[in-house]
Image (tube, rainbow, N blue to C red):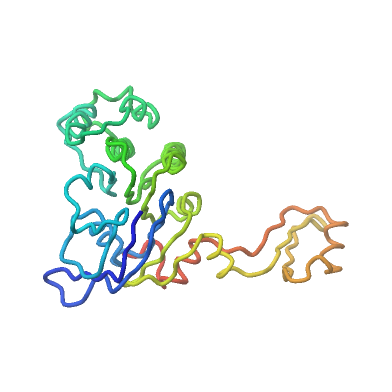
Amino acid sequence: MFAVKDLHFTYPKNREETIKGISFEIGKGEIFGFLGPSGAGKSTTQKILIKLLENYKGAIYYNGDDISKLDDSFFESIGVSFEMPIHFSKMTAMENINFFLKLYKKNNDVEALMKRVGLWEDKDKMVSEYSKGMKIRLNFVRAMLNSPEMLFLDEPTNGLDPTNAMILKDLIKEFKKNGGTVFITSHIMADIDQLCDRVAFVVDGQIKEMDTPRNLKLKYGKRTMNLEYKENGKTVSKEFLMDGIGQNVEFINLLQTKDIETLHSGETTLEEIFIKVTGVGLNHE
């Protein structure tokens, strides 16, 4: 869907490059996570991909076509949900939606979308009366108005309660199942883990790691098995090396003789990988 080759970008008033020669591809029907600390170049890359920023160096192809040569029909095929929801607050939700619908030749089923995100009953409320979570959900509906082929989502579930976050994640999965492609940035690693086929970690304008979440966990995790069991009323924890565990007499004996409480591998989390790869915490600004 996208092929980015040796992308460089410098803001007009800066001496140093913000994007320092990154290359990656996004396959059709793929959910691609673009992760990194604030200031790493995530938003800049996204703005270049959606043609908000020009004057970059390198090449970007969308469906095989150089995006610098694409006309406004490009915007008919993409949907964008920015992190900060921007709506006309003195208009109702439906007045906002109807305004944006007029920008596109192809329109989605608005009623179905609004019902899925739980906003249909509040469609005639002024957006100024909406909570942050409601505005975020309305933002997602707006990104889907033109039945896009490609979605760009920036922190799509940030500020949502678990129930509404799950509704949005289910919609993203359905979008992919129906052939859609997604470029997503988020600091909520659990969402990335649940949604993404591949992720790239960008640090200081360069991609430091790129692979499937599973492969990254195997690479950065420990090949161990941790077992917890009850003994004399207390919980005891034991760690065993994964290699040769099937022949480990102590491990097998514990399984056979103890009341096992938990058993899990030493698989690391994307949060831990994020910190290792980027060198900063998830709340770094």
Task: Report the quarter where the N terminus lies.
Answer: bottom left
> At 41% from the left edge and 51% from the top edge, which residue is drawn?
28
Left or right placement of residue 91 versus residue 117 in this view:
left
Task: Report the quarter where the C terminus lies.
Answer: bottom left
User: Residue at the left extreme?
Assistant: 13
User: Residue at the front extreme?
Assistant: 64
Choose between 170 and 146: the one closer to the eye: 146
Relative to 186, does residue 170 appear above or below in the rendering? above
Relative to 252, does residue 63 appear above or below in the rendering? above
Left or right placement of residue 34 versus residue 84 in this view:
right
Choose between 92 and 140: the one closer to the eye: 140
- Pinpoint residue 90: horizontal percent, then vertical percent: 14, 31
- Pinpoint residue 92: horizontal percent, then vertical percent: 20, 27
Left or right placement of residue 221 versus residue 226 in this view:
left
Task: Tell me which corner region of the image, top left, top right, bottom left or bottom right, holds residue 106.
Answer: top left
- Pinpoint residue 179: horizontal percent, then vertical percent: 42, 43
Task: Tell me which corner region of the image, top left, top right, bottom left or bottom right, holds residue 165.
Answer: top left
> At 38% from the left edge and 54% from the top edge, which residue is drawn?
186
- Pinpoint residue 257: horizontal percent, then vertical percent: 88, 57
User: Residue at the bottom extreme?
Assistant: 15
> At 79% from the left edge and 54% from the top edge, which residue is drawn?
233
Choose between 201 and 190: the one closer to the eye: 201
Relative to 216, does residue 153 appear above or below in the rendering? above
Choose between 251 and 185: the one closer to the eye: 185
Q: How many marks?
A: 0
